[in-house]
Structures are given as structure tokens and as C-alpha cells.
Amino acid sequence: MAGQGWICVVALAGACSLAAAGTEKGGGTVTDTRILHPVFESVTLKTPKRYSVVLPRNYYAEPTRVWPVLFLFHGRGRHERSLIEDNGTRAALLAAPFVTILPDGDDGWYINSPSRTRDRYADYMVELVAHCDRTYRVSRERRFRALSGWSMGGYGCTLFASAHPHEFGVLAPMIGLLDFPRGGLPKGQSYNVPTDRFTAQPNVWDSLNPLRKAEALRHTRILLQSGTTAFDRTMNENFHHRLDELGITHQFELLKGGHTFSVVRTAVSRVVTFVSGCFEEAGTMKRGTWFHDASYGVMIHFLGGGDDWNDTVEAFDVPAFALQMKSAGAGYVLFTLGQNSGYYCAPNAVYDRITGNAPGTRCSRRDLPAELATELGQHGIRLLLYLPSRAPQRDTRAMAALGDVSEREPAPQPFTKNWSAVIREWSERYGNRVWGWWFDGAYSREGWDDLTAEASWRTWAAACRAGNPESILAFNPGTRRDLAFASLTDEQDYTAGEQNQFEVTPVSLPCPDGLIWQILCPLGSTWSKPDGPQLSDKAMIDYVRRVNAEGGVVTFDVAHRLGQVYEPHLAQLRHLATAQLHDQR
């Protein structure tokens, strides 16, 4: 069933205990040139740390190719070479069409220990991933990055995936402790909590339990594997049921056997197959497929300026807003970085340098989009950013510094180069945490249409995708219907779709092939106005159903005050979320 997991039982032979397998090498000395055992200096742990790398067959033969990557965490009592020292698992990893990184996690559970403050293994993993990204030719695109691990490592990789949902698109824990640490599990289906590392406080345990953070995995491809007689089976079943409750599609497989290395041996081969398939499918998917499937999202106009701008930005309640968006059922949030005043809700050193503004004056000290992306991501909600296509039209000094003219005239080449540099600074900082951009006021396209010029649509789009190559783009030429659902450039992924009423649909007003049809419209009588909604709950639910059925997406502009959404708007979105949930069932 769509949105739910399925269970498969797989038989295998020759199970042995995990503890007994601890001394089993099975492979002797390994000298394959595609297996590396580097050491790097961990600043976090203040010690040299080992890790192993298994390179795909043609890694050396194709020196310019960038490869998908799997980070694979070992179990408790094991180490980074355990899978390489076993004949079966080593063969599976050597056959994989991607780079495999195997960290040394010691006995650290891959967490920042609340009781051993020096044992910051979660931060260490961030450090190691960054090191490997710099050292090897591995993809930075989320859809080509995976996490796996077994036992303690299955726990660790799942917790790490939920903490970094923008970085990894595939998750495949094996016999992982996925509802842990906790008490109250059935006899024979629990594991003693190492209180020296997790403390003895159940409220602290909750904050370290992957099941409590499963919502962050909403856009992740997931394979769970446990054993028919494994003590972790109930934990995996609990996690499986939690994913079902959240409507997160996944696969749950039971391998015949217990919490043993023989089960791991079979599970690793299955992980390689699953991850390879996910990477292969990702390579054929059109950019923005997630947006097409999102159904609807919310836009927030957060604008202002003046001497108290930093105070205004500081007052925005990010956690409360994210919870409201969760209850609203929003698949994404479109948020304004700034508009025509020349004030922005995030730092930008490039903008300050070009315009001559002191840091923290026009560009706020607080990085509001960064916080939003992180908080929304914990609820499986993606962030897109809004900017004007041109320099802030009410800040003549900034316009001159950026080299721009009126937005009704073609954009000069110097402006497009400068604006692209400003956008690139934000894009590279946010990376995979920002999933798209919506540009307003693209009224005069002549300045960008010449693709042979030094600065064009290509320059602009490359800046937007510098941090996330999967970013989707829309350019808005206005509300005229023959323009709002048109394509201004082949760099555009979805329609700008600005309208003032919820009337048109993908059938009544089609968009060009290759674009995702999207309408952006205020719930109130005009943009950000706290009145309305325009339509009754029933009429709005019917409208969204019709747009979705015809292949489109709806974005609602809502009124708010510092992140607290106008209650009648939020109430209608909650009714819509309830109707959507009913439809999915």
C-alpha cells in the first residue's frame, strides 16, 4: 500500500552469535588496491581516527567521475574493518557500484554522550563525513548519499539520518536498535541501556531514541532489516509501525535468524542491492519530483526594515512556526529572504561587500533561513526561498552598487553577475537544506535571454544550484495568466503561478511540457492580509483535490505575525491536512 511499509521474511543458513563472531576474521589479510585504511586527525575527539574505504571497480579508471557514496557504521564490539575481514561482506562491498566509507565508531553509539561530555561521536561523524567529501570523488547530492549500519551502527546511522535529513536520501539499518534507549520492552526483546553513556534518565533517553525522530525521514528511501529471532525485532517493528503512522513509504524485511553476524552477512548484500537500486532510480528521476508529489505548501512574506530590523528577525518564533506547518500538513515552505526594501533576514558577506553596508545592518545578524531549514526538516518539511529577480527597487544606493536599473528594463550584465554572486553565497551556505527558489519581478527577460553572454539565465541558475544541484527554480513575470504558467527559460522547473484567486487548474490552464504546474495565491483577500479565507473549507479542499488530481501543486500565502500564523488561515489548512490524510487512507 502506498505510504506504508511491507514485510518480507528471508531464510538463511549457518547463523552464529554476534559475540562469537567477534574474533572471526574469515578473510585473512586483505590487500585489494580498492580497499583503503586511512587515518585522519579528529579535532572533535582529539585523536587520530581510522576508517576504511571500499572503492568501486572503475574508480581509478574514470578519474573525473563523481560517485554515489554509502557510509556504513559498525556494531558494538566491532570496528571499521569488520566487514572487510569477512569474505562474504567484503565481496559484496567490492561489487558495489558506489564508494563505501566505514568509520571507526569505537563503543560510542555515534552520539554526543550526555554523561561523557568528551565523547562527541555525533560531531565526530559530521567531521568524518566532511573529511571524506573533501578527500574522495563522492557526490554531494542527497539522492546519491546513503547511510547504513548494523546493531549499534544501525541505531547510529538512523539517528544520524534523522539529524541530517537534508544530506542523505537513503537509509538501510540492519538489526538496528531503532526504539532505544528505553524500558518496558517484552522479555527477550530489550537491551540493557549503557547508563555510563546514556545516563539513567528516561527523559534524556527519549531525546536519543531514533523512533522519536522518525518524522525527519519523510523524504528518505528506507529499508529496515531484522531477524526473526533477534532481540531487536520488536524495536524494528515499533519503528516500522511508526513509519506507517507517519505515512512514510519503506520496506521492512525479516531475515531468518537472530542478532548475529550471519544475519548481518546476508543483510549487507541486501543493502548493496537496495542502495544501488535507489541510486540508479535517482539518476533517472526528473528534478523536482518531490515537489510534484507534495500536494501543497505555505508561503510566508517576512518583510520589513529599519533600525529595529535585527530585533524583528530575532523575534520570529521558529520552533512554534515549524509545529504550525506540521499541523497544517505543509509539504514545503516558501520563505522570503527579502524584497524591495533592501533588508534581508540572513547574513550575506558578498552583498555587504558590494553595497558597502556594515555586517548586521541590512543583512540581519540572525540566519533565519538556516534555522527554519533545520527545524522544518525535523518534521519532513522542505524549505524554498523567495527573492526578487532584481536589486531592491526602493534602495537606490544598493541598486547603483549592484549595477541595476528599473526592473521594467533589461537587467545589465554587471548586475546579473553581482546578483548571482550574492545568491551563490546563500546557496553554498545552505547547501541541501534549501530545495528551491522563487524569483519575483522577472518582467523584462531580454537581459538574460542571450545565453552566449557572460551573464544570463545560466549564470543565475548555476548560482542557485551551487549548494544544491537538485534545487528547483521559478521566475515570475506577473499575474497575467498567459505568463504566470509559462516558462521563461529552460532552467525553470515549475511555474511561478502567481494568482489572486483560486480558479485555474492544470487542465483549464496548462503549462508547457516539462514544467511542474504550481499556483501561488493568498488565502486572504490579498497578500499576507489577515482576513478570509477566500473560500469555504469544503470549496478549498475540493479545489486542492482537483489541482492535485490534474498533476498540480498549490502554494498558500498566509498572514502571520512573527511566525504565528493567522488563526483562520491555519484552521483551514488543518482541515485540508485532515482531508488529505483521509484521502491517503
Image (cartoon, rainbow, N blue to C red):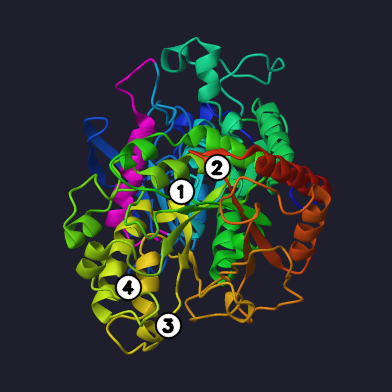
Tag shown at residue 302: 1
Residue 501 place in picture, x, y as percent: 69, 63
Q: Is residue 38 left or right of residue 312?
A: left
Q: Cα distance, mark 1 to mark 3?
A: 26 Å
> Nearer the observer, disc 2 or disc 4?
2
Q: Quadrant of residue 315?
A: top left
Position above or below: 531 against 229? below
Q: Is residue 505 left or right of residue 405?
A: right
Residue 354 place in picture, x, y as percent: 19, 62
Q: Amino acid at mark 1?
A: Phe
Position above or below: 494 against 110? below
- The region drawn magenta spans 115-140
| First in residue order: circle 2 vs circle 1 | 1
Q: Secondary structure at mark 4?
A: loop
Q: Cα distance, mark 2 to mark 3?
A: 33 Å
Residue 583 place in picture, x, y as percent: 82, 50
